[in-house]
Image (cartoon, rainbow, N blue to C red):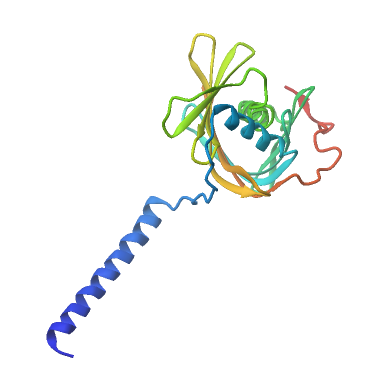
Amino acid sequence: MDKLTFVLIRSKLRLTLSAAFLAFLAMTVGGCAPREHLPSYQWVDGPTALRDLAARAQAVHTASAQCQITLTRSNGQSVRLDGAVVMQPPDRVRLRAWKLGQAVFDLTINRDGVWMVLPDDPQGKQRIIPAGASAAEMARTWALFSGEFFSASDAKMIDKGGLRIVVERWIEGKKIDCEVERATLTPRLYVLSDSSGVKRFTLNEGEYQVIGGVPWPTRLVARSDSGTIDLKLQDVELNGELPPAAFVPPRRAQKM
């Protein structure tokens, strides 16, 4: 091997190693977000897209998953919990959370209201009630949006071009806008505003996976005045059989 060939090979090897190192550095320092592998949606028009959104939602009767829950209060304090969630859209959710193997709260939502199992000691109860209320708000909203949101008669499609379309509804005097990604027809952001137009609640949905033929979000981030809830779902199962008493509050549960 002559000297010039050796130098060229050595330079190419250095460049390859440098590129590999930079790629590794970008993944480890910047984080490696899961890629979404979703089928492209063949756009026809707004009414067709709205019907297809409703059909997707109606195809999901139950959902269950393990989860990680990060609760961040408005003052910046946060706690990370392990949990499990089951849902039957549009109005039934059960969410249990624990830390280091010890139960923190057990939340049940059904048509009759919201119940929560709280710690016995007053100090622990005062810490958990705000977190539980925020979790209840997120869970109830998520169940509604995953169920009948797009099939309601007042759902209005707004298409101004661009990468996203908007579905608008009014519920109990509050305006809800849902931004839907046009390319995959997946809901990405829900914004709830009060009658004066002030944003009170947002729900971001992302890290979609196709589960049982249905695109389903595995990352949800809810924000309100009380703080932020970051929910990461794992081992998601759609349309599985749930126990008959899945949404019956435990005896110790208190109605919120």
Apparent side of residue 85 relative to residue 80 in the rendered image (left or right): right
Q: Position of residue 138 (x, y in %)?
A: 61, 29
Apparent side of residue 121 relative to residue 223 in the rendered image (left or right): right
**Residue 71 in view in this figure:** no
Identity of the residue drawn at 53% across and 51% down: 37
Q: Is residue 137 above or below residue 211?
A: above
Which quarter of the figure is the N terminus placed in? Answer: bottom left
Camera-nearest residue between 176 and 233 = 176
Identity of the residue drawn at 14% across and 89% down: 2
Outermost residue toward the bottom?
Answer: 1
Q: Is residue 18 above or below residue 85?
A: below
Camera-nearest residue between 197 and 102 = 197
Camera-nearest residue between 46 and 97 = 46
**Residue 213 in view in this figure:** yes
Apparent side of residue 127 relative to residue 188 in the rendered image (left or right): right
Identity of the residue drawn at 73% across and 28% down: 91
Outermost residue toward the front?
Answer: 44
Outermost residue toward the top?
Answer: 196
Camera-nearest residue between 72 and 118 = 72
Residue 134 appears in which quarter of the rendering?
top right
Outermost residue toward the right?
Answer: 244
Q: Position of residue 168 (x, y in %)?
A: 55, 21
Q: Position of residue 70 (x, y in %)?
A: 55, 39
Q: Position of residue 112 (x, y in %)?
A: 79, 22
Residue 124 appears in which quarter of the rendering?
top right
Q: Is residue 169 above or below residue 25?
A: above
Identity of the residue drawn at 54% across and 34% down: 44
